[in-house]
Image (cartoon, helix red, strand yellow):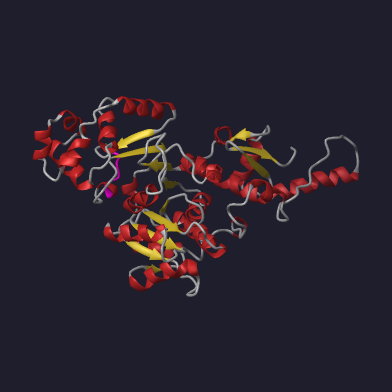
Amino acid sequence: MSATKYWLWFSGIKGVRSKAREALLTHFEHPEKIYFAADAELSKAGEISKAELEQFHIKELGKYDRIIDICHQQNIDIMTIQDAGYPVRLKNISDPPYVLYIKGRLPIMDEEVPIGIVGTRKATPYGKKMALNLGFEITKGGGYVVSGLAAGIDSAAAEGALRAGGGCVGVLGTAIDVVYPRYNEKLFEDVQAVGALVSEYAPGTEGSPKYFPMRNRIISGLSVGVLVIEAPQKSGALITAARALEQGRDLFAVPGNVDAFNCVGSNELIKECAKAVTSGADILVEYEGLYPNKIKKPRAGKLAMPKEMAREKDLEESDSNRETGHDFLKLRVPSSKKVIDKQENEGYIDLEDQLKDLPVDQLKIISVMNKPSMHVDDIIDLCALPAATVLSELTLLELSGYVSQEKGKRFSLNIKK
């Protein structure tokens, strides 16, 4: 960790162009050497102005030691651009982040088929449905979803990936320890549990609107292709699309109504440079030759989301609305009072009938939920199923009304055993 603080110092210096940083790192090979270099040596690297040179006179390292301590306490990994696990695709863009802060487990991205999915925060029901379906289908087909986890399209795409039982990488435009928007806390927790949250901003970093367009280069940099769903004429999604083209990534877009405000930008992309797609298979077919062991060919609609998993309700509605709305399933439960009575007997039979058609994995989950407010980690340990499977099946059980989710990734049964 002693060398890590110099990486944090180097990446944290303000007012220095990417070109100047790259020149210095090429010349000195490591930030520690840059830290101890004299002005004359720094000038020899070229590409650095006098004003930029002044920034390197700030040598205080205490705050970076504190960041390292905080990361250790909060189980946040720090990855530098010279670490073996740093994604090669991201390293090869023109302005890569020199440090990444990671919560969860970042897969070996260069062995995956990552597709960045972006779009407007003010998505229509159509846009959210397409993002949910395509996130699901891409994951089921062997791809890996990269999302900004913003409201609207980003969140719907990530949820689709989770429902498919796969992982997801969430690239944040905030400090690694900030959930934004706040109501997405559960989604952030689920993505971290089966994939990773990634940010170039250390815990405690004060937010700035400019960070969100800056993070777009990371979304496209991690991906082999970028999918745009519902992008108005001026939107962050179009910035990501532009960065994707600069980085030589493939570009895809979902067609929308020609007179819809939300679809002006995405429709324009289709006319100019993006492939029009309506399914995950339309995207994954482009990578069959490059990743033959990853991509799964669809068979008779097998990649489509099961009907019981699809829902047209707003993905941002509150838990209370979801549980008390007209679609919430009221389960009959057996009476705890022991009375020999035909009515009670029918109650038990009714419950048995409701459970008998559940998939094996869902029955395993229900069987180990022996107390209220069980943490998801305890459920995973007790039923001995993969974390991704448990999260996916709990989502289905919640939608069907068998379980309810509470704060802090805790779940309770809505039936009596």
Q: Is residue 187 left or right of residue 61?
A: right
Does the rendering let one see residue 303? no
| Residue at (37% x, 68% y) in the render | 269
Which quadrant of the figure contains the C terminus?
top right
Q: Main secondary structure of the magenta part?
A: loop
Q: Quadrant of residue 62?
A: top left
Q: Quadrant of residue 367?
A: top right
Question: x%, y% of residue 106?
Answer: 38, 41
* 243 magenta-colored: no
Question: x%, y% of residue 170?
Answer: 43, 46
Please say if 354 is above or below 234: above
**185 vs 281, nearest the viewer:** 185
Highlighted magenta segment, given as a residue range: 85-89
**360 vs 181, nearest the viewer:** 181
* 87 magenta-colored: yes
Question: x%, y% of residue 411?
Answer: 63, 38
Which quadrant of the figure contains the N terminus?
top left
Please say if 217 is above or below 58: below
Does the rendering let one see residue 154? yes
**339 vs 59, nearest the viewer:** 59
| Residue at (14% x, 46% y) in the render | 47
Please say if 166 is above or below 227: above
| Residue at (58% x, 36% y) in the render | 408
The image shows a total of numbered marks equal to 0
